[in-house]
Amino acid sequence: MGTILKILSFFGGGLCHQRIERTFSIDVFNMPVCSRCTGIYSGIFLSLLVIVLLERKIKGEFPSLKIVLAAVGIFLLMGAEVVLSMLGLIESSNIIRLITGLLTGWFMALLLFPLANNVMFGKFIKRNYLDSRKKFLIWTMSGIAAIIIFIFTYKYALIFWSMISILGLVIFTALILFILFFTLNRKLLGSVDSVKKYIIVIAMGLFSAVALLSLFSYLKRFLI
């Protein structure tokens, strides 16, 4: 278990401070990213998984105004928790950081996914993800369930949740790279028009994300 966690921690160090006192741990074993990052990246991965299972379609329309406002509210909630805890006005905890982080990641996936589809694909369904109350309710309840399941299982499944968080980190990095790369290069905007191209782009994006995280983690050693 120690070797696996060391590998995961190396990648996690690319975008996380990894302070031990703010990280879920069991005995001498720590999760690869802090509690807030664990929530954010696990939320992104699991939210995308639920969206894909519910939809199984490529949609590129941005979410409705209500969802965007809800997402902004969640982001502000996490930001307020960070600021108030830094000022000593409230006493935060790993569980609180996990909850605010996971909710943020949950909504973040719903914003980044269609945006990436929009710039990558030449043709996509011009509708919103979770465009029915039933799908949105299932997605929302899945997020709440993810929080509850994590709290009651992380002590017994540290490796599992560590892998989920790092997968989410890699996917998050890849989505940002997709959005930036296709947006800044007009010739590539909307150029993915086949399954073969899609597989190639996804593979390249994930490889680039892993390489970038490795570079950041390596450089971090010289900055601390």
Image (cartoon, grey):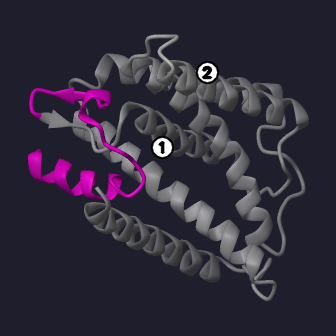
Q: Quadrant of the N terminus?
A: top left
Q: In the rendered image, which quarter is residue 202 located in?
A: bottom right
Q: Which residue is mark 2?
A: 141
Q: Is residue 16 above or below residue 69?
A: below
**Residue at the far bottom in the pictured view:** 187
Q: Which residue occupies 39% across, 73% down?
A: 211
Residue placed furthest toward the front: 87
Is residue 124 placed above or below 207 in the rendered structure? above
| Left or right: 28 in relation to 81 | left
Instruction: Name which quarter of the figure residue 170 lies in.
Output: bottom left
Q: Left of 193 or right of it: where is 91? A: left
Q: Is residue 193 visible?
A: no
Residue 136 appears in the picture as rendered: yes
Coordinates of residue 11 in the picture (x, y in percent): 32, 58
Q: Is residue 17 left or right of residue 109?
A: left
Tag shown at residue 41? 1
Neighbour class for label 1 at 10 Å: few (<14), some, many (≥20)?
A: many
- Of 211 and 155, the residue lying toward us: 211
Residue span colored magenta: 1-28
Residue for point 72% across, 76% down: 182
Q: Which numbered disc, 2 or 1, marks the residue that appears first in the sequence?
A: 1
Count of labels in the image: 2
Could you tell me which secondary element the residue under label 2 belongs to? helix
Does residue 7 belong to the magenta stretch? yes
Q: Residue at x 60, y 61 (%)?
A: 175
